[in-house]
Amino acid sequence: MAETVKKVKEISAIVDTESFTLSFPDREAKIAEFAYYKAENRNFIPGYELEDWLEAEQELLLDQYGPI
């Protein structure tokens, strides 16, 4: 998990989330990338795909907009 957070932060540092909003295709691509890193950290054990996607989506949205 710590490795995933580290990679997500590295990617997020590249994207200026203060003045940048991802379009839908870009947003999905970024979520897929984050989810991939989550799966990679689990050695691609099957059965967690939806969980990875939802966690990645939540992390991206929190990174973009902050907590509600």
Image (cartoon, rainbow, N blue to C red):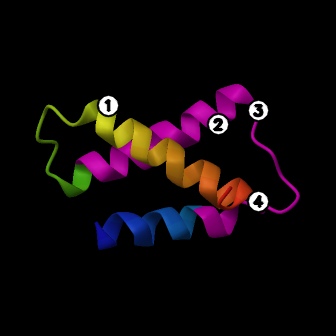
SS class, disc 1: helix
Report if the CB atoms under discs 1 and 2 are less than 8 Å apart.
no
Q: Which residues are magenta?
A: 12-39
First of labels 1, 2 by sequence position: 2
Instruction: Kindly give the residue lying farthest to the front in the view shown.
Output: 68
Q: Residues within 10 Å of mark 2 (few under 14, many from 20)?
A: some
Q: Quadrant of residue 47?
A: top left
Return the x and y of residue 12 as percentages of the image width and height: 62, 63
The residue at which mark 1 appears reads as: 50
Q: What residue is drawn where x is 58% and y is 51%? A: 60
As measured in the structure, the alpha-carbon distance from the residue carrying label 4 to the one carrying label 2 is 12 Å
As measured in the structure, the alpha-carbon distance from the residue carrying label 1 to the one carrying label 2 is 16 Å
Residue 29 among magenta residues: yes
Residue 44 among magenta residues: no
Q: What's the amino acid at mark 4? A: Thr
Front label number (1 vs 2): 1
The residue at which mark 4 appears reads as: 17
The residue at which mark 2 appears reads as: 27
Q: What's the amino acid at mark 1? A: Leu
Q: Residues within 10 Å of mark 3 (few under 14, many from 20)?
A: few
Q: What's the amino acid at mark 3? A: Ser
First of labels 4, 1 by sequence position: 4
